[in-house]
Image (cartoon, rainbow, N blue to C red):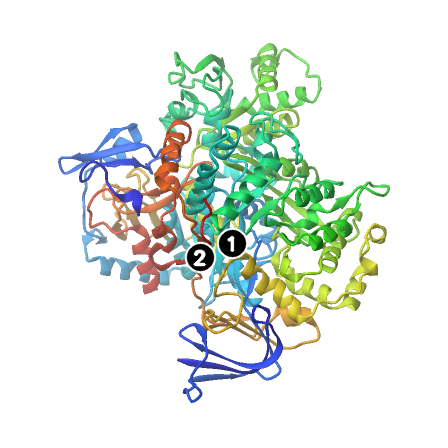
Amino acid sequence: MESQKSSNSANHYENVACPFCGILCDDLEIGPSGDGLKVLKNGCAKSVAGFERPLAEPNPQVDGKDVSLDEAIATAARLIRESRLPSFGGLGTDVDGVRAIMALAEKGGGIVDHALSDAQYRNFRVLQSSGWVMTTLTEARNRADLFIIAGSDVHKLHPRFFERIVCNEASMFSDNPPKRTVVFLGEGLNESAVKGQERIGEVVTLPVKTERIGEVLDAMRALNKGATIPGNDIGGLPRAAVDDLLARCKAASYGVVVWAPPSLGFPSAELTVQAISEFVKDINLTSRFAGLALGGNEGAVSAGAVCGWQSGFPLRVSFASGKPDYDSERYAISRLLFAKETDLLLWLASFSPDLTPPDTDIPTILLGTPSIKPARTPKVYIPVGTPGLDHTGVMVRVDNVVSLPLRKLRQSKLPSAASVLEKIEAAL
Amino acid sequence: MLIKLTGGKVYDPANGVDGEVRDIFIENGRIVSPEPNAKVDQEYALHGRVIMAGGIDPHSHIGGGKMTIARMILPEDHIGNEVARTELTRAGVGHAVPSTMTTGYRYAEMGYTAAFEPAMLPANARQAHMEMADTSIIDKGAFVMLGSDDFFLRQLAGKADFSAIKDYIAWTMHAAQAIAVKVVNPGGISAFKFNQRKLDLNEKHTYYGVTPRDIILTLARGLTELGVVHPLHIHGCNLGVPGGYETTLETIRGSEGLPIHLTHIQFHSYGTEGDLKFSSAAAPIAEAVNANKNVSCDVGQVMFGQTCTASGDSMRQFVNTRSADPKKWVVMDIECDAGCGVVPFKYRDKSFVNALQWAIGLELFLLVNDPWRLFLTTDHPNGGPFTWYPHLIRLLMDKNFRRDMMQKINQDALKYSTLGSLDREYTLYEIAIMTRAGPARSLGLVDRGHLGVGAWADITVYDDNPDREAMFTTPELLFKNGELIVRNGKIVKVVNGGTHVARPSYDRGGIEKSLKRYFEDYHTVRMDNFRLSDDEIINGGRGSLIIQPTRARAA
């Protein structure tokens, strides 16, 4: 692969894609540092933690004791064969990793679900019930004159989002692009990235409790249709502030509402996503506007996409009957574990050591990064490499449109999750 | 190993063979002419059977993010259409938007060996190829979308040197691993992002000042001079608009004799007569196609039932959301590159509009004289799922069946169509042209779509059943690259198909100098990462590349 070539010198790489959040920034420069790697340019807290993690190559284990890879694979295959209803969760991996999980889950008659599905389902439920108008990162970066950040502390999930998409200097459509307005709609959102930035005109803060954002959007939608809403308070905001926000939306040449589903951690948060989406749909009757959903860390978008194209359904699919059986409530692995409806968990976490398997007393097969520290000793542990660090791969970006190639940046003996899963499948 | 197919009636229009009884020999995956005394290792006695090359679908949305959105948006359409895993085949779902692997199996079970994704956005090319890699058995290829991407529009508005525009077209084909180029609502997807709601052929884009006519002519001329075999694949302006046929006629007249392919022409053949201001304009469109030999088209036949439309035409799809059934839909602006709209549709035989759409498609089939320039498609899944093809073939081959079907639809619709007066019945030879030889020739597939010596042995064997729907639904045998894949409509072997690409010559250094800067200043992806490598297609054997020749580049 051409883009795998290092530039300048050995082990010095430019235009590296970072798999450690859903945005997949691909402008990183990475070079050697002692035995490891150093992010030389365009790093953030997440990418530095990921790329600069020291290389460790522990042995596979069964019951906490070192074994050969073959023995670990044989044990994993036996456990799956003997399981009544295995679960394949975590899914922190790249496209080939998900492809391998899908094949294994089909053959093993099990259930697939991603660790961050609860958040993704805040979006999927809206997609499946009413749909939306969406945009993508490059489109928003060049076109938007109004950003509304809805209830999401974007920094925590995506440290470079504002730098790359909101505060960028150049615009495709003007040598001297108009200054942007950024509205923070929510509680205690970190505004530091836009304050004092050349590209930003106004920063508007609208302190709304996260779970009341939907109320504000629903009211704006009704007002936009000409309805009258009594009272001086909408979602805890003064009426005038809501009127002003609606006026800004109508005047924008291209407005974008940004949300990160993981930030909307309250019951029925999909209704907030739906309120945003329906408002955006309606305002598009007269002017252009779009949603932009963030999130999608730990390979969640790749997992949803591959499961979507291979099975027809976006995760939470059971292959127990041989056919894909879809139920977004029933086949949530967290629920299956709680209800003890599954008797084996295979957990895959190849990016972050923090994506540990749920604390469960059912047997667990863990395919994880070497530094992962599960709460209990898994029945089988197979250390795997990280796509984009230890081996090549591809991931789907948070906007569900762009996919990026991941490179191998260091020499490691760690196998890819896909290769281990394929061997387990062959041994079944 | 030498395989002999003995005594079948061969329909091989590329070689002028019309139902002659012939033996076919296969060795090392290809059709051969063995020495007279060569030892035959395996023989299939096919007396009375009909033999054609494997089917080729030149326009079927099988890959790319919009299909996966369509899959995810319609779980209810999958329910009852789930497909279980077998020892050979993977699980999946069927119907309106089948899952990837099931798509491949269903094409193979129907005797098809290739399908082409006509709307691959450059920004989404990697995912489109990943989805196609997971589409079993069949070969595939994709047409990369240009014409609403800002780099091209900037080139056009800035009156860039034509050679640089050609370099950019060629660069995009290489970068996206494409075999052809498609333009969708030329400039219109971009114009919609600037809040323009329509863009007629001679109307100016509010920001770039260029017209769809400029875009079409530039791309058509560029491709001709680059030597790309498949002409510019045009999804014209005003899709689905009553009266849109005039734009279609103007597009044909305005093509200045350059080769063009008008896709899903059924959706572009609507007149405005009658109380509902919606009528068939199939006759003038067919007349124009007949008279202009530079034009080819595919139909995009509407079939009744649930489907999901998925198109790059975000401008027109946004309007179509009013008719979404069920009422949910997705419209996207994509990467200063393109857009998409995914809108579920239920075509009803008792609906005046839907029945007329059905009739218009059939009229076009029956009024266009030359099957070499007209291909059999439903624009899967837009007009209906590709699994309707056997039914559609029977509608074309059997006028009594067609008349029976006409009794079942909205009768008012037939008053605004000439369908009832058309008696034409397609022959097997013509069907073989429309579904094999024609698409292969149009796409420049040198050794597919025919049964001459040297061709890859993609061969379908049918029972010569007078019920043509039954015949084409369940072929007896399908060989892919000489291997037996399907027997009596059931998969017996699974292989990975290849990916057809075309690689016109261009000045890579020159165009990449401009592109690198463009990507770094404006995009969120670097140029090097935008481009797909060959290794990504091959992916350790999951896929393979089939590089089709282009003609010499002019200037």
Q: Secondary structure at mark 1?
A: loop
Amino acid type assigned to the residue bearing label 1 in the image: Val
Q: Are marks 2 and 1 in contact (CB under 8 Å)?
A: yes
User: Which residue appears at 63% of the width and 10% of the height?
Assistant: A232
Camera sees residue B408: no
Residue A355 showing in the rendered view: yes
Residue B165: horizontal and vertical position, in percent? 47, 38
Which image quadrant is residue B17 in? bottom right
Q: Going by the image, does B182 lie left or right of B502?
A: right
On screen, residue B79 versus residue B391, left or right, reads: left
Q: Position of residue A24 (x, y in %)?
A: 37, 35
Tell me, yes or no, whether dots 2 and 1 are on the same chain: yes
The three-letter amino acid code for the residue at tag 2 is Pro
**Pointer 1: what residue?**
B229
Q: Is residue A221 above or below residue A116?
A: above
Chain containing mark 1 = B
- Expressed as whole percent of the image width and height from the top left, the position of residue A296 reads 42, 37
Image mark for residue B549 = 2
Q: CA distance from mark 2 to mark 1?
A: 8 Å
